[in-house]
Image (cartoon, helix red, strand yellow):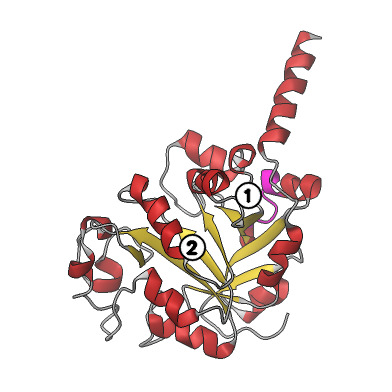
Amino acid sequence: MTALVILFVISLLYLLSIRPYTKRRAEFAPFEKQFIAHRGLYRENVPENSLAAFALAIDFGFGIELDVQITADNKIVVFHDKTLERMCGDKRIMNRCSYSELVKLRLSGTDSKIPLLSDVLELVNGKVPLIIEVKPRGNIRRLMPELDAVLKKYKGLYCIQSFHFSVLRWYKKHNPVILRGQLSTIYYRDKIKAPFPVSFIMTNLMTNFISKPDFISYNFRYANQPSYWLCRKLYNPKNAGWTVRSQQELDEIPSEFTVVIFDGFIPKNK
């Protein structure tokens, strides 16, 4: 009997741990009206997370997903990687550079520079919705308030998402009106480096009770991951699927994913 009680309590705690926040489904609806271009609509000679890629996404009427980080001098820039090597041929860590250093670099051999988030917001100007992925690197204590200060000046539609639950928790506490999404995947399959307890907890969405995400943004290839599947069946959250890389994948994506984040092709209607 004692073992059954313990098992029941553990099961109950687990089910509570994966529970998201589902009372703002209507507020999420505008993000479901168009496909979301992953790091902008980038292609040859149009680098990812560049003003050119964002302008092209706007021209096609796609929403935009982008990545933000903080520089050594506390500027919020749009850039994905930890280091500058892949995009700029520079081995330095991005967060250890000032923006005056970064602005001298070019993306993928083009004329495009690493943009400030404020410049991206000025370009988009509410024309399409934004899904902003927060990379919690560098000066974390400065990152969140600086980011929020920049975004508070923006009048367009946006939400935030992050793999790190602390980002969502910060917004839940300091600016709860902003929609927030928990990014996740099967960590070991996607080769995301993290200690096993962290990768296990995050793969299984077991910090939802802390961060209370309004939506789950999961690698669509792992839609049947047990905890994610159970979260959908029990709580029916809003779901974004990433990253769809072909029309065939788009045609086959499960219907639960009402927001589709794509790259590498121009999607046709689902």
Q: Is residue 13 magenta?
A: no
* Label 2 SS: helix
Q: Position of residue 107 (x, y in %)?
A: 29, 77
Segment colored magenta: 222-228
Relative to 113, say whether 20 is above or below: above
* Label 1 SS: loop
Number of disc labels: 2
Q: Which label was assigned to residue 155?
A: none
| Near-viewer residue (176 or 202) | 176
Q: Which label was assigned to residue 152?
A: 2
Name the amino acid, label 2: Lys
Pick whichever of labels 1 and 2 is earlier in the sequence. Answer: 2
Q: Tell whether 70 sits left or right of 152.
A: left
Determine the residue positioned at 66% across, 35% down: 17
Relative to 95, say whether 211 is above or below: above
Determine the residue positioned at 30% across, 50% down: 138
